[in-house]
Amino acid sequence: MKKIVSIIGARPQFIKHEPLKHFIEKSFKEITIHTGQHYDKNMSDVFFNEMDIKKPEYNINVGSGSHSTQTNKMMIGIEEILIKEEPDMIIVYGDTNSTLAGAITAKKLKMRLSHIEAGMRSFNMRMPEEINRIITDRLSDINFVPSRHALDNLKNEGMNGILCGDIMYDAFKYYSKKAEGNILDNIVKGIKSNEYILMTLHRVSNTIPENLEIILNRLNKIGKEIIFPIHPRTLKIIKSGLKSNNQFNNIELIEPVGYIDMITLMKNSLCIITDSGGLQKEAYYAEKKCFTVRGETEWPETMMYNANILCPNAECDFITEINNTANVKFKNPYGDGNSAEIITKYLMEYLYDN
């Protein structure tokens, strides 16, 4: 039986990995490496527990550090495992440091590499994620793309891809059913459906103390309750680096939540504010208007029909836009929720015929 090694390390990758692992295990011996990029229990363990994902065979436990330090430690750990396991294919997801480390290590060892969620471009080279995407796409033997727009991006750069849809949509559809019995009040006491805004912020450009303070002050003036499941690094900045950290009366900070609770919060929210690429899509799947606190997006399809609005530094007429829902439409360009099946079928043909 052919062997596949999957490399994951951050929240979005845990979510994407589960539906694919389910299919891959039927036809391949699958081994998972967790780099430990997200190591806080609320950013890692909760996903494996609630999504019933089997514990990874390996955990490198890389922890925090600069981009270079993290990536270097990951590559050392991944190399040792890949030499031991000798897989027929390595799978990486998305655009994190774990993605880049896995891609470079695989190709240095002359092993075959597949990139899931390939072809995405923000065209902002100041984003570490953009660098990771471009390098990983270039190194991969197979690029699995979520949309025709992503496929066009690859073709414009002289590469090919396999259109499979968005693997995260597979997970969203499945876990939305599990979230149906979830009680909102058990997640955040006292909040009511369609009366709050759900927010996440974690990107370095938005969490520089002076930028974060400006953003939070602007959002605090919306006049709506904002529920903010906060990344540990962002919380640390708020507590230690902001002058007005006690003045955000309309913003309620809560600990990071698991995926099922996050789906519940999304579906019951008035709208969503985020700088996360993944949450932009999830907002779209939940049919909630999204405000993206960035100057660009790698998911331009979500901007059609006014569903996703770019708001750099939270400079946006939120009140008007929140109330303006007449022209918002959600036409899913990311497949039918069967991406895992398409990917597995293609890998079977590729590996057993080559």
Image (cartoon, rainbow, N blue to C red):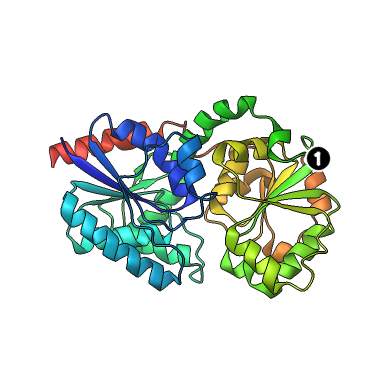
- Residue 292: percent from left, percent from top: 65, 55
Look at 86% across and 52% down and name the residue there: 223
Per the image, the residue denoted by label 1 is 195
* Nearer to the camera, 172 or 155: 172
Q: How many marks?
A: 1
**Mark 1: few/some/many CA within 10 Å (<14, 14-19, 20+):** few
Task: Judge from the rendering whether residue 109 lies leftward or rightward of residue 154; answer left or right.
Answer: left
The three-letter code of the residue at mark 1 reads Glu
Q: Quadrant of the N terminus?
A: top left
- Residue 48: percent from left, percent from top: 45, 40
Task: Judge from the rendering whether residue 81 lies leftward or rightward of residue 260; answer left or right.
Answer: left
Look at 78% across and 43% down and name the residue there: 196
Q: Can the viewer see residue 235 in this picture?
A: yes
Residue 110 vs 93, above or below: the answer is: below
Residue 25 falls in image quadrant: top left
* Nearer to the camera, 190 or 330: 190
Q: Quadrant of the C terminus?
A: top left
Residue 209 vs 95, above or below: the answer is: below
* Nearer to the camera, 73 or 218: 73
Residue 344 falls in image quadrant: top left
Task: Judge from the rendering whether residue 179 lies leftward or rightward of residue 336; answer left or right.
Answer: right
* Nearer to the camera, 227 or 292: 227
Task: Judge from the rendering whether residue 2 lies leftward or rightward of residue 176; answer left or right.
Answer: left
Look at 36% across and 61% down and name the residue there: 100
Residue farthest left in this picture:
354
- Residue 162: percent from left, percent from top: 33, 43
Q: Can the viewer see residue 158 in this picture?
A: no
Residue 177 vs 8, above or below: the answer is: above
